[in-house]
Image (spheres, rainbow, N blue to C red):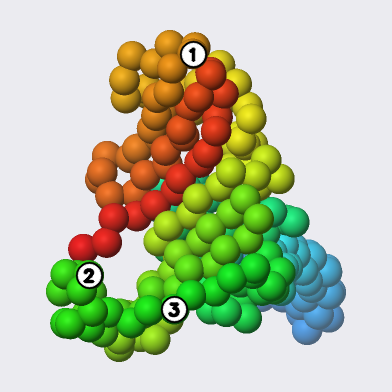
């Protein structure tokens, strides 16, 4: 009798273990229908995430296209991030013309019109100028009413680069809107970094200089009767 009871208990335990294992497998595995439903539920979310990622990159692409399409005016090229050179400039008819800008005869005429006079000189060893460091360089002088611009071209590059600007007409203003005829006080407010070179009094002449730390690129305002008489912007040639 005892052996029959033991056998029955073993059979019942086996049945229970089999049922338990079958239940675990059914819970762990999804039917094809359930799997399909799950995939359909996840698809919109994943698509939304994908669309969101695409949208996040769209503005960068649009900005890039906008930058590449932006027109750059002649004489307005940035000087490789050099703030000083961008400051040493004047504005005329929406053109910003600065020291070290490249400007050939066609570009100068496009920005400022046809000059009243244009002179050109190529330095040589026997030209009497004693400018041996500039032998082979060509200097051009563009003269307009109240404005003179000098360019220099290096023999290798053949590019004309502005190195000297002189302004006496108030229609040509600096990038900080200072022009001939402005008061000394207005000039000081616009260029607080500058300084008078002498002890200029209201009835005396003096020069007010805005000069960066390299001492090569300079903007100088000639003062007479406490007003700006002329403006020179120049770069010292080696």
Viewed as shown, does residue 87 lie left or right of 235? right
The residue depicted at 81 percent of the width and 80 percent of the height is 36
**Mark 3–mark 2 distance (CA, rounded to whole Å):** 14 Å
Query: Relative to residue 190, is residue 11 depicted above or below?
Result: below
Q: Are marks 1 and 2 in contact (CB under 8 Å)?
A: no
Q: Are marks 3 and 2 in contact (CB under 8 Å)?
A: no
Q: Where residue 129 is drawn, which disc sits there?
A: 2
Residue 86 x %, y %: 49, 51
Compared to 119, does 209 lie above or below?
above
- Residue 145 appears in the picture as rendered: yes
Under circle 1, the secondary element is loop
Residue under numbered circle 1 = 203
Residue at 83% of width from left, 69% of height from top?
Answer: 44
Disc 1 or 2, which lies upstream in sequence? Answer: 2
Density class for disc 1 (Cα within 10 Å; few <14, some 14-19, many ≥20) is: few
- State which quarter of the image contains the C terminus: bottom left
50, 153: nearer the viewer: 153
Quadrant of the rendered image containing residue 197: top left
- Foreground of the two, 143 or 49: 143
Q: Which mark is residue 186?
A: none
SS for tag 3?
strand
SS state under label 2: loop
Residue found at x 62% / y 50%: 146
The quadrant where residue 112 appears: bottom right
Q: Is residue 73 visible?
A: no
> Which quarter of the picture shows residue 106?
bottom right
Q: Residue at x 79, y 65 (%)?
A: 48
Alpha-carbon neighbours of circle 3 within 10 Å: few (<14), some, or many (≥20)? few
What residue does disc 3 label? Answer: 120
How many residues crowd around disc 2 within 10 Å: few (fewer than 14), some, or many (20 or more)?
A: few
Horizontal side of residue 186 vs 58, given as left or right = left
């Amino acid at each position: 009798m005892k052996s029959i009871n033991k056998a029955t208990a073993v059979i019942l335990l086996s049945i229970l273990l089999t049922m338990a294992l079958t239940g675990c497998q059914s819970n762990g595995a999804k039917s094809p229908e359930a799997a399909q439903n799950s995939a359909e539920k996840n698809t919109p979310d994943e698509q939304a995430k994908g669309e969101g990622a695409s949208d996040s990159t769209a503005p960068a692409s649009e900005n890039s296209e906008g930058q590449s399409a932006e027109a750059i005016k002649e004489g307005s090229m940035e000087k490789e991030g050099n703030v000083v050179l961008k400051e040493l400039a004047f504005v005329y008819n929406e053109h910003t013309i600065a020291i070290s800008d490249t400007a050939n005869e066609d570009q100068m005429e496009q920005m400022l019109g046809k000059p009243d006079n244009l002179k050109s000189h190529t330095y040589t060893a026997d030209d009497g100028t004693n400018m041996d460091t500039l032998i082979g360089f060509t200097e051009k002088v563009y003269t307009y009413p109240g404005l003179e611009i000098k360019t220099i071209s290096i023999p290798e590059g053949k590019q004309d680069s502005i190195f000297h600007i002189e302004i006496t007409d108030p229609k040509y203003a600096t990038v900080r809107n200072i022009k001939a005829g402005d008061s000394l006080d207005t000039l000081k407010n616009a260029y607080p970094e500058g300084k008078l070179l002498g002890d200029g009094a209201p009835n005396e002449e003096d020069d007010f200089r805005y000069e960066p730390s390299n001492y090569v690129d300079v903007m100088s305002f000639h003062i007479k009767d406490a007003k700006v008489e002329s403006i020179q912007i120049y770069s010292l040639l080696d």
